[in-house]
Each structure stands twice: as C-alpha cells, then as structure tokens.
Image (tube, rainbow, N blue to C red):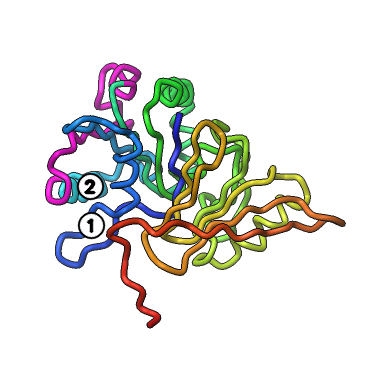
Amino acid sequence: MQILATSAGFLPDGRYGARVGPVLHHALELAGAGPRPRLCLLQTALGDDQSAYARGYAAFNRDRPDVVLSHLALFPMPNIVDIRAHLLAQDVIWVGGGSVANLLAVWATHGLGEILRAAWEAGVVLGGVSAGSLCWHVGGTTDSFGPQLRPVTNGLALLPFSNTPHYDSEPGRRPLYQRLVANGTLPAGWATDDGVGLHFRGTALVEAVADRPGARAWRVEPGPNGTAVETPVEPRLLPGALPDTTR
C-alpha cells in the first residue's frame, strides 16, 4: 500500500515536449515490478486532453521503453471496458494535474474511488502530481474554481491528511493552507514545493524525495491560539535530479 504524492512528474523538454522525470522513475522503483513494469496514466483533471497523453507516450517510449504504458480516458466514454480489472493489473497508476474538483466529480460518476482504493490495497503504487497528489488526501487548496484559491474537502481520503502542492510557486497557497488548517476546515497535513514528492507506505510517511535541489516538503499542523505550525522536511535528492543553478 504505497502512495507517491507530488508536485513533480514529467519534466519539460524543449525538443520533445516532456521527459520522464526522476520522481516517475522512483514510482516505478517503488513498485518493484519485473523487467516490463505496467503504468497507467490518468489525465482526468485535464478532461483527458489527448495532447497530454501523447506527450506521456512519447516520453516513455523514448526514456523508458521497458514500461508497458496505457491510459484510462473517461471522456467522452471510458476507453477501457473493464476499468477495475485494468487498474488492478497495473504496477503504477499515475494521475496528472489540472482540476481536482472536476477529477473527483468524474471519478465519482464512474466509481473510480472504490476501484482505486482496491488497487492501493492490492499493492499497486498510486502516484500523481498536483491534482494527482491532492486527490489521495482528505482535501487541500485548489484553483479548480478560478484564480481565487479555495478549499476542496471531498478527496478520496486514502491518506487521512490534507495536502497542498506548489507550496513555493503559487502565491496564496501557503497562507490559505495554513489558515484552513488553523481553523479546522482541513486536518493537519503536508505541502510540497515544486519538484518534491511524499512517499507513504500505508498512511505513514516514509520520506520526502525531490527532483531538484533547494525544494522542501512541509508538515502543517494546528498551533496555539488559532495559528498553524509549519515544519520543514528535507527531501532526499533523487538520481538524475536537476542541477543546482544557484552556484
């Protein structure tokens, strides 16, 4: 039972559009699969944008041709007849970013919550970036409703915490998240700077990992007198991480 909840995944590539980043390589390592690991992409949060799937296939075909890649699209109708059987047969399920509110609504319509819980309990590594991180938690902060950030509280709750991605790069995330934890709208939880992932085994944090230097994870808990307490967590830098450009 493992989850890799991140603000990372594919990395931009000026020539090819995207490449498989260190965090995705790490997700495959966590699965401990054989020579032909199976990974399924879900881009529900982008409305199953076909260009996002195309970039994913191109990146894996170039960087990890050993991976048996597939995708689950739900628009305009599922592209897979037996969704449950397909997802339970994977080693890794990777969920892309976008609108977490829309993702959760569409998943509820198709019964994905129960299926993904069954996959998690069966040993499939669940992972994702941004919306694909928040979805595994109780809730967090989202721009699903427009530029004004708002809370979302109907996550799958496989992890009994709150979660906020892009903690260092999207103005407003940090103060809103702290306020929501402080006032009890969200339970205590974890935030990730861009490039950082949180590896959970069951519901216990194993470690934070990063695909670039200088990024952190953060534990955010209610503090005294209606405040929030923020504790930094130093991640382990993954092989193939981006170079330190501050030197």
Determine the residue positioned at 46% across, 69% down. Answer: 214
Measure how far apart labels 1 and 2 are at the Cα level. Answer: 7 Å
Determine the residue positioned at 38% across, 33% down. Answer: 125
- In this picture, residue 99 sits left or right of residue 94: right
Determine the residue positioned at 32% across, 24% down. Answer: 87
Q: Can you give x and y, in whole percent of width and height, for residue 166 in the image?
A: 49, 59
Q: Can you give x and y, in whole percent of width and height, for residue 65 in the image?
A: 12, 42
57 or 121: nearer the viewer: 121
149 or 7: nearer the viewer: 7
Secondary structure of the residue carrying numbered label 2: helix
Determine the residue positioned at 13% across, 45% down. Answer: 61
Read off the magenta span: 61-88
Amino acid type, mark 1:
Ala
Secondary structure of the residue carrying numbered label 1: strand
Residue 94 in view in this figure: yes
Q: Are marks 1 and 2 in contact (CB under 8 Å)?
A: yes
Residue, disc 1: 18
Amino acid type, mark 2:
Gly
Residue, disc 2: 56
| 219 versus 70 height, above or below | below
Residue 109 in view in this figure: no
- In this picture, residue 126 sits left or right of residue 56: right
Q: Where the N terminus falls, by quadrant?
A: top left
- Does the stretch in magenta take in 84? yes
